[in-house]
Image: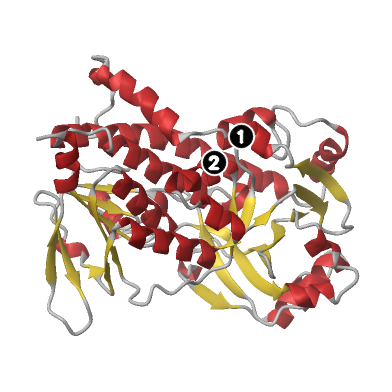
Amino acid sequence: MSESKFRSNFHVCIVGAGIVGLAGGILLRKHGFKVTIIEKDAEMHNVGAGIQLHPNAVRVLKDLGVYDRVRSASVLTPAIILKSYRTGETLHTQNLQALEDNYGFPLLTVHRAQLRRILHEAAVSSGVQFKLNFNVDVTGVDLERGVLRLFQDGSPPEIFQADLFVGADGANSVFREVLTGRKLDVVPHGTVVNRILVEEKDIINEPDLLHLVEKPSIITWLGPNSQAVTYSLDGIFNIAFTRPWSTEPLDAFFGSQTVDLEAFKAQISEWTPEICALVGLAKDCRRWMLFEPKAEEASAPWVDPTAKFCVVGDAAHQILPYLAQGAAIGLESVSVLAYLLGKAENKEQVRDCLAIYQQLRKERTGHVIRASLKNGRLWQLVDGPLQSERDREFRNETPGAGYPNLLADPFFQSWLWGFDSREAVEEAWETYTSNQKQEICMPWS
């Protein structure tokens, strides 16, 4: 069978039509695969708040063919600014003007709903087929045969078969539960994120806040066990406020909850008047719980021995938001997966591609998970000697290895933002085809 005929006859089913799932569908179609995306949301509701797209994420959007559309719907970020929560003093300004020269792409901010809409339209145009309003029955996943049992309310179950299933079904992934044989243990991180969207026209009417939209930088106020991240979304202003919460599993919640705005304002009364004024413009606020990445999850499989199932994005890993890399790492992973599968000429090579994918992505993702935890700890130090020393470094030292803003550390930044999926795959594939197949750590060996 020719390579092109193999791909056109090879059916990949992606479960989950979020950012990562849609991106995977587009990339796999570019390689000639037959692709179906299953999504439980019948209406493809576009919900959510802002998202930061760092150069490593934007590079994938370029490969997808949607970069120009996304950029036109985004805000180009000139700087990342870190401020004191109490005084409002600028502790550090990270100029981003040279990003396109250094990495080929800028840092953008965009509404998550806008990004998803653009990706959905591109997926439809590329020939991805969609099955909406279907849920996956966890008891009906057959790893050996490559079969799912789907269900809709009021309808009999439907059996769905494909050559490869890709679980992009989020943190509560059915596929991860099947691959690991257990549900994900819930370990609250001890924080929630309060999310607020404010109309920029309301900010423009406040002279003391006008600069926030005139120079649309990403500003993070660093507080004790808290931080507030703000940025523009082209007409809407995004506020993500991380606050302390219970670490007890019994207090965990999924999805979002309504926040009592008046109580929230009282909690942050000691913060700088600038951030208090911003929150004062809010009409509503919702919170999401953050969960702790578990060390044992590093050994959990991302692919199964039959080479018919794998997981990507939040279904494979949990990344806290302190480097704004959750979506970026998911996009990287599904890009690596698609480029590897595009090399396969038969089903045996698909099996090996999945093993290479797991090996490549687990290592890098693990580093990002740990770095994000570290950055969060540095930015949320309580008042005291460590916080004072951190602020002294911000004011007086040139960013280098170990700088308390990892995104400004030139060594870490280059490693993070300079990642190229194609280059990583080409290097791995050269190793694979150079009679060094034994160096690949097969998850089922």
Element type at mark 1: helix
Judge by depth and name the residue closer to the eye, 352 or 323. Answer: 352
Which x, y percent locates residue 356?
A: 30, 31
Visible residue check, residue 294: no
158 vs 266, left or right, is: left
Judge by depth and name the residue closer to the eye, 237 or 265. Answer: 237
310 vs 365, left or right, is: left
Distance CA(mark 2)–CA(mark 1):
8 Å
Residue receiving disc 2: 56
Tell me the amino acid under the disc marked 2: Asn
Tell me the amino acid under the disc marked 1: Tyr
Graded by Cα atoms within 10 Å as few (under 14), some (14 to 19) or many (20 or more), the crowding at tag 2 reads many
Q: Residue 149, located in which quarter of the rendered image?
A: bottom left
Which x, y percent locates residue 90?
A: 86, 50
Residue plotted at (18% across, 35% down): 3
Which x, y percent locates residue 431?
A: 32, 19
203 vs 140, left or right, is: right
Residue plotted at (54% across, 76% down): 257
Q: Are marks 2 and 1 in contact (CB under 8 Å)?
A: yes
Residue receiving disc 1: 103
